[in-house]
Amino acid sequence: MVAKLRVHFTWTHLKEILMISLGALFYGFGLVTINIKNNLAEGGITGITLLFRAWWQIDPAYTTILLNIPLIILGYRFLGKKGLVYTIYGTMALSASLWIWQRLPVGNLINLHDDLFIAGVLAGIFGGFGSGLIYRFGGTTGGSDVLARILEIERGVPMGKTLLAFDVLVLLASLSYLDIEHMMYTLLASFVFSRIVDATQDGSYSAKGMLIISDHYEVISQKLMDELERGVTYLNAEGGYQRDERQIIYCVVAPNELVQAKRIIMACDKKAFVTILEVHEAVGEGFTYARPHHSLFSKRKAG
């Protein structure tokens, strides 16, 4: 049993390290071939490395390491053992990625013909996908993430506010070498970046959760299971006014099934109370978002 746990632990961490490495390669590629080539800035510590490159022609591969060393030293108590190791590795992987891509002949792989709109979108896609992979598998690239975590623990400042303030300061400083036009496309890249990070972290998972309150819950549940092939769960509840016990139906459906689900509910009970929730992920045996697949020749079991 112990041996099996050790093997599983080793392979899990190996997978995480490989995916963090892949994420760093994507991030570094976008930064070198899109941001730097098209003179677009970046937020956070990465943005500061681009400032140093613009001001003093210092390679971002080196400043990424140098700027993160004091932050990692400051934040080691707040990261935990695994977080500290993965932050150090993520920082080194990004630095190595920047070093590699700047020395490989990849400058003309993506020729955008000075189209800054496409450049902004692609910068956000590459950076967001790379960062999303790193975050999804437990890593970070250090930088402002570490600083934000310290302030949240020590001062109670929400991480989102710290990261936003830091990015604003860096972007304002970037106006020292950018004009307004390039800054606006940098903001476009930042918007796309945030959307892609969220999608990558969630695995591009898109679903809707439904909470349904109805006296005809059994009929509704059966219809949802038969017509949509979606599982349902009963939640025990108590009415606030009459203090009567009732069952609430919880069901996860695909976005394109939402209209059909509402029709099923309204056909069974026009007075049903329905709440729609955003679902970022649903895992576990017997409760899956993916639609069941049936073989062409297999018989469906009655449920």
Image (tube, rainbow, N blue to C red):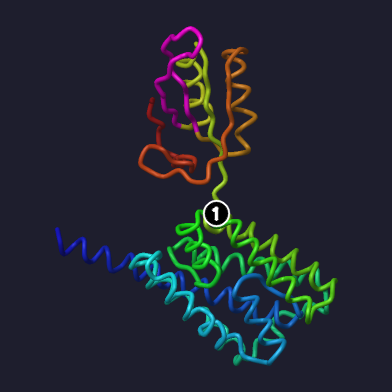
* Image quarter of residue 185: bottom right
User: Residue 140 location, x and y as percent?
Assistant: 48, 68
Residue corresponding to mark 1: 158
User: Residue 192 location, x and y as percent?
Assistant: 69, 61
Q: Which residues are magenta?
A: 231-251
Left or right, 34 with respect to 97, comes to right
Camera-side residue of 249 and 182: 182
Residue lying at 47% horizontally and 28% vertically, measured from the top left: 250
* Image quarter of residue 122: bottom right
Check disc 1: other Cα within 10 Å, few if <14, some if 14-19, many if 20+: few
Circle 1 — which element? loop
Q: Is residue 246 magenta?
A: yes
Q: Is residue 83 magenta?
A: no
Assign the N terminus to one quadrant of the image. bottom left
Query: Does the magenta stretch mainly form a helix, a strand or a loop?
Result: strand
Assign the C terminus to one quadrant of the image. top left
User: Residue 166 location, x and y as percent?
Assistant: 63, 67
Residue lying at 35% horizontally and 71% vertically, measured from the top left: 14
Residue type at mark 1?
A: Pro
Left or right, 229 with respect to 302, comes to right
